[in-house]
Structures are given as C-alpha cells and as structure tokens.
Image (spheres, coloured by chain):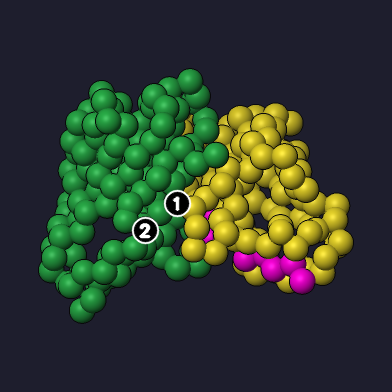
C-alpha cells in the first residue's frame, strides 16, 4: 500500500535561517507531488507541484523553492526564512488526473 | 487565488442533526472533491464528484454539484461528535490535470 512520510512534525527556526522540509512517498511510482501551506484557521494555498523528476511548477512567487531529486522525494527549501513563512506545510501526492490527494501529516513551522 | 469558497465559515450543530456545507468556485472544472481535516493534521479525502455528475452518496455523506451555478454542497446526515473537523472543497480545473485548488473551509462543531 502507498504511504507518505513528511518530517519534521514541528520546527522552530529563527528569521534568516535556512529551511529544508522533506517528503517521501512509498508504494507508488511517478506520483504527482504537491506542497501546500495553510495559515492558522485558513484554507490551503498551493505552493508547488511536480509531475516528474526535476519538473517543478511554482504557483506563488515567494521566498521558497522546491526540488524533486528522485521520483518519490519532494523537498521544500528556503535560503533565508521570513516571519511570513510561518504556517502549516502539507505535502501530498496523487496519481494520474488528480483524482484523490493523499496528504502527509504536516509540518508546523514557526519562524521567530 | 482561491478557486473555491465555502460557506458557512463555521457551523455548530447538535449531535444527530444534519450538517450542510456549501462551496462555490469560479472556473470550469474536471471534478470537485471534499476533504476533512482534524485539527493540526493532514487532510483526508472524503468524496469526489465529476463535472458530469449531479449527486453522489457515500455512507452518511451526500454531495451535489450544480455546474451552471458553479456550486457544490456537502451534506452530513445524522451527525456525530466525531464529525467535528474542518471540511474543504477542492477543484480540479478543466484545463489542468494536476492543480487541485482548495477553498477556505468550513469548521464544523458537533455538540454531544
């Protein structure tokens, strides 16, 4: 069966520090991968999605970047965090035609 | 930008009552999906309705879709305290196979 792993669960980082969040999927090949961000009590904002290795689509200009070095690995990065980068980050995957998203358990990022 | 907007933003009902949440969207879609999120967790897929479908059932869930009004509703019948969560609609645009855009969600509280 397919599983998705996202870590860490919580992260507290100072302003200006780098960021690396990792997400891996098991049990499937060539998934579509997504990074979403959720502000407290709000909906999900699509940040990046990837349909294949090295293929990244960015939805919102921002301080973050994403990479997909392997088929089932998706990484969210920043060189210098801003206060506004705080939020709940969710990784997700889907098969063809985005019929159903499977979400990781999320990372609560606090930038202080 | 948000594709879907749910209303109400918050809903409080007594156990046993029905809960109805609505979602409106802006563009033509391939499908519309509903997800549930418990506080601080990832989202879980509930049900998908295709653009050529008008109604779908799954257990105590009933989803309707009106493409002429660009709206959908989620009905939870005979609610239980365990249904307390946030509910989000997500749309897959007709011109995309990958981008699932989420609304701002409805926070449902079911009082025992």
Residue A60 visible in image: yes
Chain B drawing hue: green
- Looking at the rendered structure, the secondary structure element under dot 1 is loop
Taking A57 as reference, is B87 left or right? left
User: Is residue B51 shown left or right of residue A95?
Assistant: left
At a point 25% along the width and 48% down the height, the residue shown is B74
Q: Which residue is mark 1?
A: B104
Mark-to-mark CA distance, 2 and 1: 8 Å
Chain letter, yellow in picture: A
Q: Residue at x 29, y 36 (%)?
A: B71
Residue A4 visible, this angle: no
The residue drawn where x is 46% and y is 44% is B102
Give the letter of the chain under mark 1.
Answer: B
Q: Residue A103: percent from the left, percent from the top?
A: 50, 51
| Picture quarter with the C terminus of chain B | bottom left
Q: Residues within 10 Å of mark 2 (few under 14, many from 20)?
A: some
Residue B64 percent coordinates (x, y): 21, 39
Q: Which mark is residue B9?
A: 2
Vertical comparison of A86 with B23: above or below: below
Question: Bounds of the magenta span?
Answer: A104-112
Residue B23 lies left or right of residue A68; in this view the side is left
């Amino acid at each position: 069966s397919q599983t998705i792993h996202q870590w860490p669960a919580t992260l507290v980082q100072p302003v200006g520090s780098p960021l690396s969040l990792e997400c891996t999927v098991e049990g499937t090949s060539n998934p579509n991968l997504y990074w979403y961000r959720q502000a407290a009590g709000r909906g999900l904002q699509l940040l990046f999605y990837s349909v294949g290795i090295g293929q990244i689509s960015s939805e919102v200009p921002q301080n973050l970047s994403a990479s997909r070095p392997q088929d089932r690995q998706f990484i969210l990065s920043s060189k210098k965090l801003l206060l506004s980068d705080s939020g709940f980050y969710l990784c997700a995957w889907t098969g063809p035609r985005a019929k159903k998203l499977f979400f990781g358990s999320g990372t609560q990022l606090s930038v202080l | 930008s948000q594709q879907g907007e749910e209303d109400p933003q918050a809903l409080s009902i007594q156990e046993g009552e029905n809960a109805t949440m609505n979602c409106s969207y802006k563009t033509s879609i391939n499908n519309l999906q509903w997800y549930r999120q418990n506080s601080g967790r990832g989202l879980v897929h509930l049900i998908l309705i295709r653009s050529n479908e008008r109604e779908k059932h799954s257990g105590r869930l009933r989803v309707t879709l009106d493409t002429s009004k660009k709206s959908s509703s989620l009905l939870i019948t005979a609610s239980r305290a365990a249904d307390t969560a946030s509910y989000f609609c997500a749309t897959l645009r007709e011109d995309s196979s990958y981008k699932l855009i989420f609304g701002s969600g409805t926070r449902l509280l079911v009082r025992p």
